Structures are given as C-alpha cells and as structure tokens.
Image (spheres, rainbow, N blue to C red):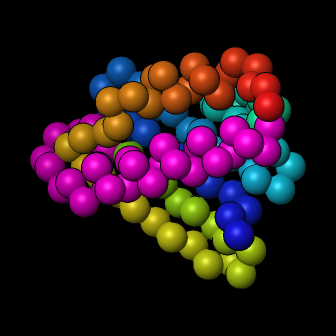
Amino acid sequence: MIELIEININNPFNNDLITIDYLNKIATINNQSYNVKPGYLNYITHTLTYWQNEYGTKNGIDIEEFTIKVYDNNKKITIFHGKGVYPSNYQEFKTIIKEPNYE
C-alpha cells in the first residue's frame, strides 16, 4: 500500500514539490496543503502511472526534468525520473488537487 508520494518537477519556469500523503489524505503543493478524498487518491495513482509509462524512461539533455518517489508501507521506495521532459498535464494536475474533490 502506498503511504506517500513526492513529485519534484523542475523546468525553467516552475520548480514544484508536490507530496501526497495517502494515510492522512492530504496533498501539498509547495507547502500549501489540500484535503483529498479517498476516491481521488485513485485518480492521482492512475495519473502517476501514466506519467511513469509515458515520461519515466526519457533521458534528454534539457534542464527540464521530474522525479517521483513512491514510499510504501514496507518502507520500500520506488523512484522514476524523466530528464529533458516533464508531464505536459502537470499544471492541470495541480489545479485539480487544489479544487474541492467530491465523492
């Protein structure tokens, strides 16, 4: 079971740190916290799986990059990293986290 996800996105215009605390159901974007409903956590996991498959194997030379660390309840850490690319929909992802999410 996932306990915590850290997303670090760096590009010339944005440097964002997003954390998703699955146990407390809280998402934090650059030190601003938002409550997240349990069903919405599934959406987050689905989106990050897509990012891993689509962008996690890129190794470009540009300064744009992202790193995602997934911590599970066995203290195992899974890391995937894309360089020279970052998820094109991450601004929308941040906006959705900030909006109230209903079940």
Q: Which residues are magenta?
A: 37-65
- Between residues 14 and 51, which one lies in front from this camera angle? 51
- The picture places residue 39, in percent across and down from the top left corner, at 73, 42
Q: Residue at x 38, y 47 (%)?
A: 51
Eyeballing the image, is 85 above or below 29?
below
| Left or right relative to 27: residue 47 | left
Q: For the N terminus, which image quadrant?
A: bottom right
Q: Position of residue 92 (x, y in %)?
A: 48, 22
Magenta-drawn stretch, dominant element (helix, strand or loop) = helix
Magenta region includes residue 38: yes
In this picture, is 27 found above or below 24? above
| Of the pair 14 and 57, the residue shown nearer to us | 57
Residue at the limit of the structure toward the front, as seen here: 103
Q: Position of residue 64 (x, y in %)?
A: 27, 38
**Residue lying at 80% horizontally and 31% vertically, measured from the top left:** 103
Which quadrant holds residue 10? top left
Image quadrant where residue 59 sits: bottom left
Q: Is residue 21 left or right of residue 80?
A: right
Work out which residue is located at the far left of the displayed protein and give it: 61
In the picture shown, does residue 26 fall above or below 22?
above
Identity of the residue drawn at 73% across and 62% down: 3
The question of residue 52 being in magenta is answered with: yes
Q: Specify whether residue 67 is in view.
A: no
